[in-house]
Amino acid sequence: MFNIEAIDIHDLLDAIPCAGTTYAEWAEVGMALKEEGYPLELWDEWSATDTARYKPGECAKKWRSFKGGYGASPVAGGTIYQMAVERGYRPPRDDEDGFVFGWDDNVSLSGIVRPEYVERKDVSHVGDWDPVREMTRYLETLFERSDYVGYVNESYENEKGKFIPANKGVYGRTAGELLDELAKCKGDTTRVFGATNPKGGAWIRFNPLDGQGVGNANVTAFRYALVESDNMDITLQRGMYEELQLPIKLMIHSGGKSLHAIVKIDADDAAEYRKRVDYLYKVCKDNGIVIDTQNRNPSRLSRLPGVMRNGNRQYIVSGECGQSSWQAWVEHIAAVKDDLPDTESLADKWTNMPPLAEELIQGVLRKGHKMLLAGPSKAGKSFLQIELAICIAEGKPWLGWNCAQGRVMYVNLELDEASCFHRFKDVYEALGFAPDNIKNIDIWNLRGKTVPMDKLAPMLIRRARKHDYVAVIIDPIYKVLTGDENSASEMAKFCNQFDKICAEIQCATIYCHHHSKGLQGGKVSMDRASGSGVFARDPDAQLDMIELPLSDAALAQKKYEAGIEVIRQWIRDNHPDWHLQEAMGDYSNPTEALNNTMKLLGEKVAMTSLDRDILFNNLQCAIDAAGQSATTATAWRIEGTLREFPKFAPKNLWFDYPRHILDESGVLADIRPEAEKPAWQKKERKKKPKTDPEEMNNQEILEAAFSGLEMTMDDPNEGVEIARLVDAVEHAGYKFKADTPMSSRKRTVGTWIKKVGSGFIKDEKGIVRRG
């Protein structure tokens, strides 16, 4: 039975919504459950969750048609596991932060499984002895019909009393031929494989051959490896193999003192096969399984099920079990291993310090480190990250910081593909950069295809390994956020994914996040990001954006600079030999600068008055348009919290779509975010008074009535009789019932006055004053 200690079959089925399966998948779940010995009721219960398609009795009818799969490759428990994994299921484990690593990584693997705590598993043969069925199942499970199969049925006893193969055996017959003969042999397997030595049994090679020989060079597909131990109790062997979740295709009882685990390797070639088998054997060895290392060859023989050996049966103990594939097993081992580094003595490093990582953004971020860009919505964070990607690709300064040149991976989670490419081109042109190194930018468009960060990280790492990126930019992270962003423990696990990217690819990881709600000016920069403080404290560098409220003077300065830049650019394009200061003259406003420029033009260039007037008008229109556009710009301040470098002075910049421009005039330097202003400088936010009596509560009506009476008083402190106040309340719109006497009306208003916080008092004479 598909039996992994940490996995409950109900958890697997819960991960596979029946309503989301095809008919074939629905049937395969039933086949697998029956193959693994589960009851019909379990399949029927799961099927009933699909209320649209479920029909009572249909499962029972279909169940009876499942014949165990011996006429074809059996559908076993691994099928259910794979379906669950494809839909996001992950087996429970103690280390939820386990990471993905390569099968040839140099890691410590000891301590995953301890034999003394492993449950022993029964390996007894169940059911009638049917050699044809055993052999058929073996061939159908491991081979394609066209594969050549090698087997040995003759043996002899050596000097140590051990029976070993007498020759190379047969290797020129295909699995299809053997299966066809088994189907016609009427139970006599000697007609197919020949007679065997009853003391020695028989062997078969688990990888297909080319039909020309039995050496490693004759192996045509490196699908499987053999794990066997002769030095461990056979029930413990099975327990250990399953506890380690080895990706087993078949488990064979050798008829002696060992199990033969045929493990899925799925290597592309002999070199990869050797590395994977070395890794497999190392995991087994480090966890207390003493295995026969002579079995590492791909052409190795294992025991042929369906044969007797010295009075014992060679038979299939179980079908597929453990992890569904080699890669899934590698990831599982990574998730439960302990590969924490050893402690190191500071004395050993004191005179030979390891070199620091190179700076990617000078004075801000090193290669291999993490940076968070935080800011409110519509701050242009995506544009700022695109600017950064371009500056790194071209080796240009970003916001005044020099950037090391290198290749960048930009992970786009928000924009559709076309918009993303257009945005990059727009920013390139706005920055004025020639696209000399656009090959340094790779864009991974994932809008509509995103998965949680813990699943995205290993996919990203696999794609990025071979490209030598210096930075990976992820925009934005809310699209891949997992867990409660206000939970420190869940956000710590989320942020650990960025560490994995940095460590695996050896590049910087840069990502952006949004601010929490409310005014941010009164907070320090690292406390503005939404959610747990982990967001701000985890990265090596945090850059935080906050909007600056623009004064009339700041907007006027922006319009002035925009107009002046129009003239400067025209001079650069048409008369680069002119000295800008001389050409523009008076800088008091763009029009005067334009007049001085036109005067100089008239002195140096022969033009008709008409041409000069046309040029003047065109430039004036361009200046006006630039000034108008400047009024739509927003102003921002970037502050930083750095782990590796001293704190930098805040950077003030304009966001003039689609780029950010440093404020070189200094006009933004003295602007303070609204929450930082003294109380007397803050804008008074008056609530719009309610004028409709039906929208006013009793307190508001009382206030409106008394305020109206105050306007008729010579001295508001002298107060007013309550009867007059009642009349004023009615005048303000409060509707008493028509037959309500004045005494009751006075009591009603008196109750309003007595209410705590009303702001009014009534003395014993019935005079109402402000309290």
Image: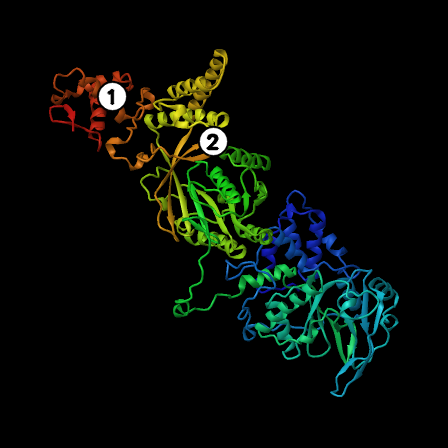
* Quadrant assignment for the C terminus: top left
Residue 63's mark? none
Q: Which residue has dot 2 on it?
A: 657
User: Residue 577 appears at what percent x and percent y?
Assistant: 46, 28
Residue 704's mark? 1
The colouring scheme, among rainbow, by chain, secondary structure or one colour, is: rainbow
User: Residue 387 appears at what percent x and percent y?
Assistant: 49, 39
Where on the picture, by quarter, is residue 691?
A: top left
Task: Decide: is 707 above or below 99.
Answer: above
Where on the picture, by quarter, is residue 675?
A: top left
User: Residue 238 appears at what percent x and percent y?
Assistant: 64, 71
State the separation of the CA atoms marked 2 and 1: 48 Å
Task: Decide: is 57 above or below 579.
Answer: below
* Quadrant assignment for the N terminus: bottom right
Which residue is most to the bottom?
Answer: 159
Name which of mark 2 and mark 1 comes first in the sequence: 2
- Label 1: which secondary element: helix
Task: Decide: is 105 above or below 237.
Answer: above
Task: Decide: is 392 above or below 342.
Answer: above
Along the horizontal axis of the image, is 188 left or right of 762?
Answer: right
Identify the residue at horizontal 53%, vertical 52% (top origin): 454
Is 563 or 238 nearer to us in this picture?
563
Is 141 or 584 nearer to us in this picture?
584
Is 403 or 344 nearer to us in this picture?
403
The three-letter amino acid code for the residue at tag 1 is: Ala
Along the horizontal axis of the image, is 79 left or right of 385?
Answer: right
Counting other residues with Cα less than 10 Å from the Cα at mark 1, is it few (<14), some (14-19), or many (20 or more)?
some
Along the horizontal axis of the image, is 311 left or right of 422?
Answer: right
User: Residue 233 appears at what percent x and percent y?
Assistant: 63, 78
Along the horizontal axis of the image, is 618 left or right of 450?
Answer: left
The three-letter amino acid code for the residue at tag 2 is: Tyr
